[in-house]
Image (tube, helix red, strand yellow):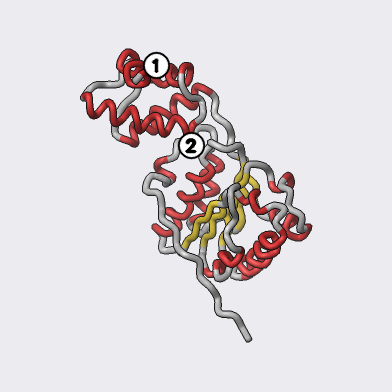
Amino acid sequence: MTMAKQLPLQFEFRANQSFEDFFPSTNNEVINHLQKASSGLGERQIFLWGPSGLGKSHLLQACCHRAQSLNLSSFYFSFSAIELPDPELLMGLEVFDVVCLDNIEQIAGNAAWENAFFNFFNRHRDEDHILIMSANCAPNQIAIQLPDLKTRLNWGLTLKLQSLSDHEKIKTLIFKADKMGFEISAQVGRFLLTHYERDLPALWVLLTKLDQASLAAKRKLTIPFLKQILDE
C-alpha cells in the first residue's frame, strides 16, 4: 500500500526579511548567488554558513520571498535546538521549487532525522529543484553521522557569510534605521556599539525601541536623548 504524500504546512513570511532589507556590506557575492538560485537561474544547491547573528535566517527568508515573487513555490523551516519536529515534515516537500532549511546542524546525531533528510534530499534533487541550507559551521564540520548524507551536504556551492567590522555594523545600523523610517547618525551608531550592544539581533530590537521613543517624543536621536531613553 502506497502512503499518500503529506504536504507540510506553509510558513508565514516575515515582511521585512527580503533582499532589499538586507545590508550587503562585504557579502555581495553571497547575496548574488542566493538571488540567482532563488530565481531558478543559479546553483541548485547552496550551503550558507557563518556564526549566529549575521543574517542567515533573513537571507533564507529573502530567498523564499524572491521565489514567490517569480511564481515559484517555496518553503522555509528553521530547526530549533530545543525540539525537533516529526521527520514527516519532509514528506511531500520535494514538490516545492525552492526549499530553505535553516540551522541544519540541529539534526546532527538524530538518526531518524538524518535518514529522513537523506531521503528527502534525493527526492528533491531528482525533481531538479533548489535546496538552500544554512548552518553555524561549514558542511564538513557538521557532526552528521550518516556518511552518505554528510557527502551530499558538501555537494553544490558552499558560501560563508562574513562577519562585520565595527565600521560596517554602524553602516548597517544606519541602513536598518532608514528602512524603518527614521534616521540615526554615524555618531549615534558608534555610541550604541561602544556603550550598549554589539550583537546585531540585539541591535535590531534596540532600534525598534529607539524608533518608538523618537516618534513618541517627536525628537531626533541625539546622544543626550539616546542616553535618556536607554537609562529609563
Tell me where residue 5 sits by quadrant.
Answer: bottom right
- Image quarter where the C terminus lies is top left
- Would residue 139 appear left or right of 61 to someone viewing this image? right
**Where in the figure is residue 104, as x and y percent of width and height?**
62, 51
Cβ–Cβ under 8 Å for marks 1 and 2: no
**Residue 24 shows which numbered tag?**
2
Q: Residue at x 46, y 55 (%)?
A: 64
Q: Residues within 10 Å of mark 2 (few under 14, many from 20)?
A: some
- Image quarter where the N terminus lies is bottom right
**Where in the figure is residue 180, as x and y percent of width and height?**
32, 35
Choose the circle earlier in sequence order: 1 or 2.
2
Q: Residue at x 33, y 27 (%)?
A: 210
Q: Residue at x 55, y 70 (%)?
A: 92
**Residue 187 shows which numbered tag?**
1
**Where in the figure is residue 7, as x and y percent of width and height?**
51, 70
Tell me where residue 3 sits by quadrant.
Answer: bottom right
